[in-house]
Image (tube, rainbow, N blue to C red):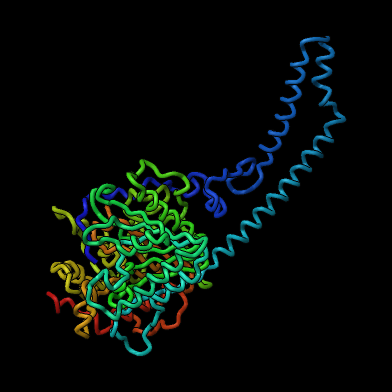
């Protein structure tokens, strides 16, 4: 969708992150995250959760000894020296030592029992919270069809409606813009706008429920995107709304994030905007993860960054407060189960100044995924440009481009890049794609192929829908990892534009890609598989082999 003019800044990555996760400020438990203002109990428990016997024992003895010494000294104002000595040292007569030891050991046993019970209950609750369920959700434009047996995923509309049905006390949404209503796009009625109207009505109904809190963090309204839908919800009391002014905060850019957080337990992120066209006229991909409070609470920290920056006159702080720090990043990933498959995962964010301590930047996450691929890298994005797009002066930015070339040349990784062609495509996009695929020759053993996905308009109405009929996906899948993001792949999106990504790492599991580096699967081979990575791979292969994926020669 259209972007605004963005300012350029140096890509410094997120704020400095310690080399080891345990060097971060006190790693908070899920319970502490739910109650960030409650002080942590840090007495005589070591960082590994074990009781420090030496420290505990010394504290007891120091307390008793200093207390008696104080009383002896205070009593020294009268009486003989002999009486002062007797009063001070009578406590440590040999007959008292066994009793002291017994009392000390008894206290230790009680404390250990309580601590063990607390840790056991925490471990059980964490294990339950990490048994998560997921769905890959898609928006398939009207009349776009695939061969029988191709992967079929739940729709974005059904996923969003399901999240609203689950909501009991809170819904947080971060959005680029709002055009769920037909009238937001055109005075002409479009029947395909009905799904957007449905989502808006359900969101309004949800927000008006007693005890429900709906919060919306969005990009600053403008004459291009007046954000009328969220204004209606705010006026009705169905939502609290804050807008981020990126021109003031970052000298350019926009909030391009698309994410939902429901009851601090269920999440959505993906390419779909709060736009009826994203449900019926634009091809979108996202993921919904249910019953996953550990990941949801980490996503909430990203939302709280937006929420704070949406306050009147807010500025980016020199350092973010500790409750917004995270211990989950590309170096220390959250371990959980997705539909029974053990994975390691984390959320990345951009731009770098929006990253509190510990948070990996989005571009660092993407580079890490590419650099660790062993067999293949499949990328589906609307735009792919190793440069800035929204600057007065264009700047070269080859970070991702270099990583793809390095993977293919140095490690013989198979690279497939599927970008999009539509009525608003920039004419130089095919040239940048061709510069990658041109490396593929028999003599070099490099295997990089690129194509452009075209969503045809089959009816006069579809041709009249503004900014419709495009493949808007933003994801990557390798033999190791699935990545789903909200950003197009050009410099601006990672330097001064708000976005997030989810990395799902299946390294070491039986769900890794098993095919050899010189053998591609055919569409449908992975239909019905369970792993998130496998499902995303099947989706990519379906699109890559479809009639809508065109060779570059058709555009150059």
> In the orientation shown, which residue stands out farthest toward the bottom?
148
Choose between 40 and 179: the one closer to the eye.
179
> In the orientation shown, which residue stands out farthest toward the front?
236
Choose between 471 and 419: the one closer to the eye.
471
Give percent across and percent down for residue 379: 30, 70
Choose between 360 and 6: the one closer to the eye.
6
Quarter the N terminus occupies: bottom left
Give percent across and percent down for residue 395: 17, 54
Q: Is residue 141 above or below residue 119?
A: below
Give percent across and percent down for residue 173: 40, 61
Give percent across and percent down for residue 268: 42, 67
Q: Is residue 376 above or below residue 312?
A: below
Q: What residue is at 25 percent from the left and 64 percent from the top?
A: 405
Taking the image as shown, residue 299 lies to the left or right of residue 539, namely: right
Q: What residue is at 44 percent from the left and 68 percent from the top?
A: 205
Q: Is residue 540 above or below residue 351?
A: below
Image quadrant where residue 320 sits: top left
Quarter the C terminus occupies: bottom left
Count of numbered circles in the view: 0
Taking the image as shown, residue 421 lies to the left or right of residue 146, namely: left
Q: What residue is at 25 percent from the left and 54 percent from the top?
A: 253
Image quadrant where residue 105 sits: top right
Is residue 483 in view?
Answer: yes
Q: What residue is at 48 percent from the left and 71 percent from the top?
A: 165
Is residue 335 in view?
Answer: no
Taking the image as shown, residue 92 lies to the left or right of residue 328, namely: right
């Amino acid at each position: 969708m259209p972007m605004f003019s963005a300012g350029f800044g140096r890509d410094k990555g997120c704020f400095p992150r310690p080399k080891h996760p345990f060097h971060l400020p006190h790693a908070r438990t899920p319970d502490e995250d739910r109650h960030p203002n409650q002080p942590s109990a840090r007495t005589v428990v070591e960082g590994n959760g074990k009781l420090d016997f030496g420290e505990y024992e010394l504290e007891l003895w120091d307390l008793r000894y200093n207390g008696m010494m104080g009383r002896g000294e205070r009593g020294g104002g009268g009486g003989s020296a002999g009486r002062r000595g007797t009063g001070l040292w009578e406590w440590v007569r040999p007959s008292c030592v066994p009793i002291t030891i017994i009392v000390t050991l008894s206290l230790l046993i009680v404390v250990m029992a309580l601590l063990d019970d607390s840790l056991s209950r925490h471990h059980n609750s964490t294990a339950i919270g990490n048994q998560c369920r997921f769905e890959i959700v898609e928006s398939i434009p009207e009349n776009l069809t695939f061969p029988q047996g191709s992967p079929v995923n739940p729709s974005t509309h059904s996923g969003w409606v399901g999240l609203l049905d689950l909501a009991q006390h809170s819904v947080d949404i971060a959005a680029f813009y709002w055009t769920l209503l037909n009238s937001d796009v055109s005075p002409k009625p479009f029947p395909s706008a009905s799904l957007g109207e449905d989502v808006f009505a359900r969101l309004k109904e949800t927000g008006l429920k007693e005890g429900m809190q709906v919060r919306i963090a969005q990009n600053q309204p403008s004459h291009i995107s007046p954000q009328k839908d969220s204004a209606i919800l705010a006026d009705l009391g169905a939502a609290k709304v804050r807008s981020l002014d990126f021109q003031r905060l970052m000298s350019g850019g926009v909030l391009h994030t698309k994410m939902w957080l429901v009851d601090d337990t269920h999440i959505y992120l993906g390419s779909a905007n709060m736009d009826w066209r994203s449900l019926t006229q634009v091809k979108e991909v996202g993921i919904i993860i249910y019953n996953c409070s550990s990941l949801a609470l980490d996503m909430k920290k990203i939302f709280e960054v937006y929420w704070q920056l949406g306050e009147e006159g807010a500025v980016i702080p020199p350092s973010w407060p500790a409750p917004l720090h995270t211990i989950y990043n590309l170096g220390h990933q959250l371990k959980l189960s997705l539909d029974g498959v053990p994975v390691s995962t984390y959320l990345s964010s951009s731009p770098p100044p929006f990253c509190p301590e510990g948070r990996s930047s989005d571009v660092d996450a993407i580079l890490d995924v590419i650099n660790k691929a062993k067999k293949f890298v499949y990328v589906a994005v609307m735009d792919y440009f190793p440069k800035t797009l929204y600057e007065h002066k264009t700047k070269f930015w080859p970070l991702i481009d270099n990583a793809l070339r390095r993977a293919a040349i140095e490690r013989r990784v198979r690279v497939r890049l599927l970008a999009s062609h539509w009525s608003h495509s920039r004419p130089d996009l095919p040239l940048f794609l061709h510069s990658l695929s041109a490396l593929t020759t028999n003599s070099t053993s490099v295997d990089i192929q690129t194509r452009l996905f075209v969503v045809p308009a089959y009816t006069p109405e579809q041709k009249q829908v503004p900014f419709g009929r495009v493949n808007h996906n933003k994801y990557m899948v390798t033999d190791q990892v699935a990545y789903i993001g909200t950003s197009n792949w050009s410099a601006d999106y990672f330097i001064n534009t708000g976005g997030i990504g989810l990395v799902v790492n299946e390294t070491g599991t039986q769900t890794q890609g098993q095919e050899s580096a010189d053998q591609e699967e055919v569409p449908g081979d992975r239909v019905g598989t369970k792993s998130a990575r496998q499902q995303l791979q099947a989706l990519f292969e379906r699109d890559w082999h479809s009639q809508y994926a065109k060779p570059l020669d058709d555009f150059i």
